Structure formats: structure tokens, C-alpha cells
Image: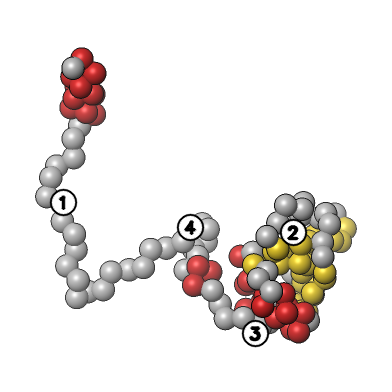
Amino acid sequence: MVKIRLRRVGAKKRPSYRLVVADARAPRDGAFIAIIGHYNPLTDPETIVIDEEKALGWLSQGARPTDTAARLLAKAGIIEKPEAIKRKTKAGVTEKPKASKDEPEASITEEPETIKEKTWKNKKARKN
């Protein structure tokens, strides 16, 4: 599978990244197929330069962007912001869609079993 991802370049503690098209099995800073742009997070505002023609060409051929690459492509206006990225929280966990007020909340009809009850049932099942 071919991915669009970031490749780190730059000095120690001064990161700068190239947006590259690479085989998914290749290491982060290893072999790549093409460079389609660059990203510098240290400037204010961050610098994002992406060749739109190359990016769209690789996307049309089936290249899949990583989450960060998709965020940068969306910021550059090349693709729409993906749903998974829209719902990300600071912890990196995707939020579940919130239930609407019209739908009733699911209620628990049975009480959960205690650990002792579960182990007792397991022992009883093993003996039979």
C-alpha cells in the first residue's frame, strides 16, 4: 500500500518535515517514491507548501494519507477534513457520536454479576 506521510528532516530539536509518498513498509525516514510538499511547524504561522497537482494525482491512484498528512492536506484546501480527524480529542481518542435528545437513553435491565458469581459459575461448568 502506498501512503502519503511526513518524513522528518532538519537539525536536532529543529524539526522540519517533507510530505512524501512512500510504501507503507518503508521506515519513516527511509525510501520514498515522490516529494509532494514540505511542512515547518516552527514558523508562526506554520508553513505548509504542497503541490496540489501531485497530491491529487497520488490520491486518485489510491495513496492513503496518514492522520497528520490528511490534516495538512485539509489545511491546504486539497481535501476535505476527514470525519475521524474532526472528532479527535486532545488525548487522541476518537469521540463517539453523541445521542440526540429525542432518543431515550438505554437503561440497564439486569444487574451486573459480581466477580465471585462469575468464578463460581466457571468452576461449576468445568466440573460438568
Name the mark nearer the viewer: 4 or 3.
3
Counting residues from the start of the chain, the first of labels 3 and 2 encountered is 2
Residue that protrudes farthest toward the right in the picture: 11
Q: Amino acid at mark 2?
A: Asp
Q: Relative to residue 97, is residue 108 drawn left or right?
A: left
Three-letter code for the amino acid on which mark 4 is drawn: Val
Residue 42 visible here: no
Earlier-in-chain disc, 4 versus 3:
3
Between tags 2 and 1, which lies in front?
Answer: 2
Q: Compute the Cα span from label 2 to label 4.
A: 26 Å
- Mark 2 highlights which residue? 23
Q: Mark 2 packing: few (<14 Cα in 10 Å), some, or many (20+)?
A: some
Closer to the chain start, of discs 2 and 1, is 2
Kindly indicate whether the residue at mark 3 contacts the one at mark 1 (C-beta within 8 angstroms).
no
- Residue 60 in picture, x, y percent from top left: 67, 78
Does residue 17 lie above or below 74 as drawn? above
Q: Assign a secondary structure to mark 1.
A: loop
Residues at marks 3 and 2, CA–CA distance in whole angstroms: 24 Å
Residue occupied by mark 1: 108
- Measure the alpha-carbon separation of dots 1 and 4: 25 Å
Q: Residues within 10 Å of mark 4 (few under 14, many from 20)?
A: few
Q: How many marks?
A: 4
Q: Which mark is residue 83?
A: none
Numbered badge on residue 93: 4
Residue at the spot 49% in from the left edge and 63% down from the top edge: 89
